[in-house]
Image (cartoon, rainbow, N blue to C red):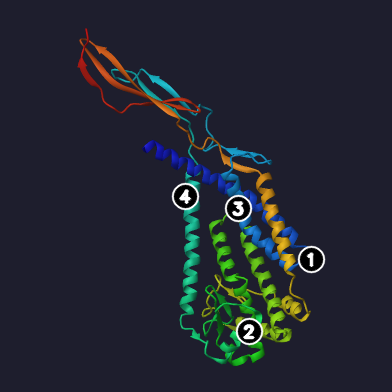
Amino acid sequence: MMLHDLETVVRLTDATAGWLLTYLVHSTVILGAVWLIALRRVVSDTVREILWKSALVGGIVTATIQTAITREPLGGQLRLAPRTAGPQVPALRVEVRQDIPDAAPRFLVMRSRGTRWTNPLVVFWLVTAGSGLLWVTLGHARTLRALGSRTPLDDTPIGHRLRWLLERAGVDRSVELTCSSAIASPVALPGDEVCLPRRAMLELEPEEQDSMLAHEIAHLVRRDPQWLVLARAIEMVFFFQPLNHLARRRMQEVAEYLCDDWAVARTSRPVMLAKCLAAVAEWVGRAPAMTRPRLHPMSAMVESDGSPLVRRVGRILGGRRAPHALTSRVALAASVCSLAVLAGVAPRVSVAHAAMRIERFTFLRTAVRDGGTMTDRDALIFFQAPVGRVAFDSLVGSTVVRAVP
């Protein structure tokens, strides 16, 4: 049972190492291709968003498919040895040792030299990924704690206007509206909640407040807070892929553009939204850095580390129309087909001879004559494996019995 458990752990470790390396290859190809496509101006923001989202999860999907399917992809397979390089010796061989002061020869298994690199690789990945996820979770908890004193606005005039906007836009969901003095930019929180900065109640006109609410409703309708949490998790778990950070940043940027389009299409007040964006950008720029909570797990209207405000205002005042639904469906179908083709074509990385599969074993007993007695000894256990017959020295002691005439 212990041998079987060890075999399972070794097989799982080697398979995980191969999956991680395969993901690194596939994600680099996908993210690099999407980056080149997104640079073209003819590509709409709707298509850009779908491409970046597909790129974030695409490497995970294709690497998992290739690991689960044993058939070799068209791009071939790179087989890596599970141990570091060493002298060329057989992986396993049986040797008879006569120089040991014992009553009978001992059969020892000579293992291949070199150290296993898959075990420390997987352990390092688990520890680092777990630490990253813990860091994101603690950051989310700190932000919620900073927003703990927020005030509900459901029974206020702006709360009534929020429900009117939801009904006008055809959004059938209950959205909680709150405000807090700890933030300078409105945020859409997971769980259908919109939190506004307290100064928005005092310094913005009702039409500007409506544009702000419409923008945040768009985040909730599009599930941007959930996508942001997922993107942060992928960025932390696959920390060795720096392009995930680029994909997450581009995804957030495009989401803001599309939420602006959604808000203008529902309120028909582009000038009010542009004025609201300018005011929020000013609040964020003047907010003290020490008292400004980090909103990285949440969708902020204007972020503290900069926002493409000029382009957003230009898009809003330029009269861009909301994208057609057909464009989204075509882009999504093309992304799915591309990932399916990549799963069958892209090369795969695997660890050769990940584990020894034991098919059957034979237990042998030997008898050694010593004067007038015979020693009955459990000598060897032979395992029939794909690499050959492997013998392990018995750990069972000998038993002295009466000699048979």
Report the residue marked by disc 2: 165
Residue at the spot 59% in from the left edge and 88% down from the top edge: 200
Report the residue marked by disc 4: 123
In this view, the mark in front (4 or 2): 2
Q: Position of residue 33 (x, y in %)?
A: 72, 55
Tell which residue pokes out farthest to the top in this image.
405
Q: Position of residue 31 (x, y in %)?
A: 67, 56
Residue in front for this viewpoint, 73 or 254? 73
Label 2 Cα crowd, 10 Å radius (few <14 / some 14-19 / many 20+): some
Q: Is residue 103 above or below residue 231?
A: above
Amino acid under disc 1: Arg
Whether residue 301 is visible: no
In three-dimensional space, the C-alpha distance between marks 3 and 1, rounded to whole angstroms, equals 28 Å
Residue in front for this viewpoint, 382 or 222? 222
In this view, the mark in front (2 or 1): 2
Q: Which mark is residue 61?
A: 3
Relative to 381, 192 lies left or right? right
In this view, the mark in front (3 or 2): 2
In three-dimensional space, the C-alpha distance between marks 2 and 1, rounded to whole angstroms, equals 33 Å
Relative to 248, 94 lies left or right? left
Q: Is residue 241 above or below residue 266?
A: above
Q: Earlier in the sequence, mark 4 or mark 2?
A: 4
Label 3 Cα crowd, 10 Å radius (few <14 / some 14-19 / many 20+): some
Relative to 259, 98 lies left or right? left
In three-dimensional space, the C-alpha distance between marks 4 and 2, rounded to whole angstroms, equals 51 Å
Report the residue marked by disc 1: 41
In this view, the mark in front (4 or 1): 1
Q: Position of residue 248 (x, y in %)?
A: 62, 64
Q: Is residue 194 above or below residue 296?
A: below
